[in-house]
Amino acid sequence: MIICGVRALALDIGEKRIGFAISDSQQSIAQPLKLYKRGSLAQDIDEVKKLVQEHDVSRIVCGLPKNLDGSLGKKAEAIVEFARKLEEKASVPVDLWDERFSTDEAHRIFDMHAYKQKKRKPFIDMMAAQIILQGFLDAQKKG
């Protein structure tokens, strides 16, 4: 259920960086927000909590990198654990959303606009987070 007047925040969590995307206040359109270089677990969670406060976030969506067969590998299990700890500390609901192919889709978008690999690198994780969030928002409207 979407609550109007507050935003959703999405995370594309990688080993070195986290890409963030944010929704509009009606939770209908996602846009890239920022790229964050990961630190310790506590630092990562503090960064998310800061964004929750700054942007009036009521829901967090973490991309879940499932295997092609839908199973969870080591990376996905680490994301599940991160999301569990984040929900405890951030005091807002955290959803997991299948992110299979979100980074591939982000690369396709950059390919369509002829962005060179070096130019797109800082933006890929934010674009992937935007794709994750838009998919989540669209599914909520249908549900």
Image (tube, grey):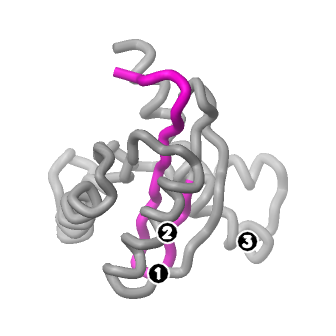
Give the number of the mark in front: 3 or 1. Answer: 1
In the rendered structure, which amino acid carries the disc numbered 3?
A: Gln
Label whose residue precedes the other's in the sequence (2 or 1): 2
Left or right: residue 1 compared with residue 78:
right
Question: Label for residue 117?
Answer: 3
The percent coordinates of residue 116 (x first, y second) are 80, 68
Give the position of the C terminus as an image quadrant. top left
Q: Is residue 19 magenta?
A: yes
Taking the spot 43% from the left edge, 86% from the top edge, the residue there is: 39
Residue picked out by circle 1: 38
Instruction: Please give the name of the residue rendered at 25% of the width and 55% of the height, measured from the top-left corner.
Output: 87
Quadrant in which residue 81 is drawn: bottom left
Q: Callout 1: few (<14), some (14-19), or many (20+) C-alpha neighbours within 10 Å? A: some
Who's the residue at 48% across and 54% down the image?
A: 52
Residue 103 can be seen in this image:
no
Q: In the image, which residues are magenta?
A: 1-20
Mark 2: which secondary structure? Answer: strand
Horizontal relation, residue 22 to residue 120: left or right:
left
Q: Where is residue 20 in the image (x, y as percent from the top left)?
A: 55, 58
State the residue lying farthest toward the right.
114
Few, some or many C-alpha atoms within 10 Å of disc 2 (few <14, some 14-19, many ≥20)?
many
